[in-house]
Each structure stands twice: as C-alpha cells, then as structure tokens.
Amino acid sequence: MDIEQKQEEIIDHFVKQASSLEGSALGSLVVEATSHPSLFAFSEILAVPNVLQLEGTETSVNLDVLRLFSQGTWSDYKSDASRLPQLVPDQVLKLKQLTVLTLAETNKVLPYDQLMQELDVINVRELEDFLINECMYAGIVRGKLDQLRKCFEVQFAAGRDPRPGQLGSMIHTLSNWLDTSNNLLISIQEKMKWADTMTELAKEHKKEVEDRVEEVKKSSSHKADIDFRGHEEIYSEPGGVMDYEEDRSRPKRRRHPIYR
C-alpha cells in the first residue's frame, strides 16, 4: 500500500474520531494524530467543526498544535515553545520529518549544514542516520546522500498541507507547467508532421527511381532484341555471308613469281 492510500485511511479514522469529541477531550486525539508514524497531513482534521470550535477557548492550544504540524517546522516550535505544550518524543520526530519535507519543497539540494541547524543535529553521522532511517525508510523522501559535497540530493518528497497564500503560487506553477506542456506537445506534433511528409517524399522518390530502373531495363531489353533480329537477318540472306565450308572447297589460285 502506497503512502497516499495509507494516509487516506488514517485521516478518515481521525476525522471520524474528532467529529465525535468536544473540548478538552480532543487534546488526547491531537497528541495521538501528531504522533502517528504514518500521518503527515492534518488539514482534514483541522477542518472538522468540533476542532475549529476550540478557537478562543481554554483548550485552543490543541488547535495551535495541529496547525503547527500542518504547516510549521521544528524551528517554528522552538520559537513558540513557551506557549505550546511540551512535545512527546514521537511528536518531536514527526515535526522534524515534516521539517525535511518543507525544506525539500523549494530546494532539491539540501546542504548538511542547513539540515543540521534546522533539525538540531550535532554531527553528520546523526543527520545521515535520521535521513535514512526516519525519512527514506518511512517513504516520505527519496534521494542521495552526497558525503563528498555534504548535501542531500532530493529525488522525491511527499507533499505537506498547503500554507495560506501558497495555493496561488501552486496554481501559477501548474499553469506554467501546463503552458510548457502544450508548447512541447505542439512541437512534437510539428516534428511528427514533418517526419510524415519526409516519409511520403522518400516513398515517392523511391517509386520514381524504381520506375526509371524499370524503364531502363525495358529499353535495354528492346534494343538487345532489335540487335539480335538484325544479326539474324544478315546471316540468313542467301548471298549475305559465304559458308565457311564452301570457301574451303574452292581451289586457291597459285601466285606466279615475278622476275625483275
């Protein structure tokens, strides 16, 4: 089962649970959802009316935690840690995983120095272990660890919940991609049309050559036939050519010597 399908089932489970809870009872659900090892999207849970009703209440901090995991990073948590509840280890791991996804959205080559700073990792070995064991094995990213250049080359990264204002940028990016695809399609169609035209011309040229060869063959054959008939007529005339045996039977004249 791929990560998207697996997340759909998990999200559906938490949405149903959130719809049946209210107030402070949602606190434990928020912790459970943000600690789940296979859940990386939270916008559907945030959209549940019972969750939105936490705004402005004594337990609104649970809504803030959900928003942090939906769109924030580990650095965001550290800057607001005094107001937010302390995270359990599984939540810390999840938020750091989400931080890698956020960084991979805008840059496909992530320097080790940047990653260590954003994730609070003290050395390269710990960083590479985290990227391999907690990110690549989890299926949320694929890439190459370049120890020589000290960077992580991202080949694939799972998407996060869109942030406010990000939808317009996504639409713009998709529109540009669509325009580029259409232009590429037109170019391919033109090249295919050109190839078809050249193929037809090649067929016509081949036929012309074959017809010309056939004409030359017929002309040569006709000329050869005429030459053969001409020789045949010459040799068949009564006085045309002296028979060799007849020539041999005739007495030869004796040439008299000439005296001077």
Image: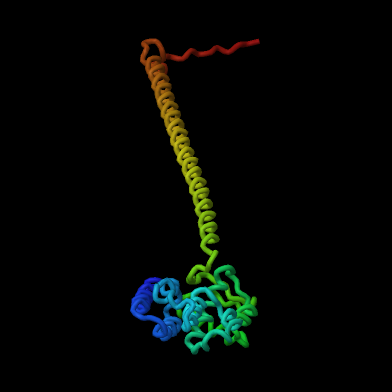
Pinpoint residue 202: horizontal percent, then vertical percent: 47, 37
Residue 124 position in % (x across, y down): 61, 85
- The image quadrant where one finds the C terminus is top right
Q: How many labels does the image show?
A: 0
Left or right of 174? Residue 75 is: right
Q: Which residue is drawn at 55% across and 73% down?
A: 102
Asked whether residue 42 is in view, the answer is yes
Q: Could you tell me residue 70's position as x and y percent? A: 49, 75
Quadrant of the rendered image containing residue 25: bottom left
Residue 6 image-quadrant placement = bottom left
Q: Measuring 43% from the left and 75% from the top, which residue is drawn there? A: 53
The answer to whether residue 251 is above or below residue 155 is above
The quadrant of the picture occupied by the N terminus is bottom left
Residue 235: x and y, percent? Answer: 39, 16
The colour scheme used to paint the residues is rainbow
Whether residue 249 appears in this view of the structure is no
Camera-side residue: 119 or 56? Answer: 56
Camera-side residue of 112 and 192: 112
Residue at point 48% right, 12% down? 253
Above or below: residue 255 compared with residue 209? above
Outermost front residue: 57
Residue in the foreground of this view, choosing between 240 and 103: 103
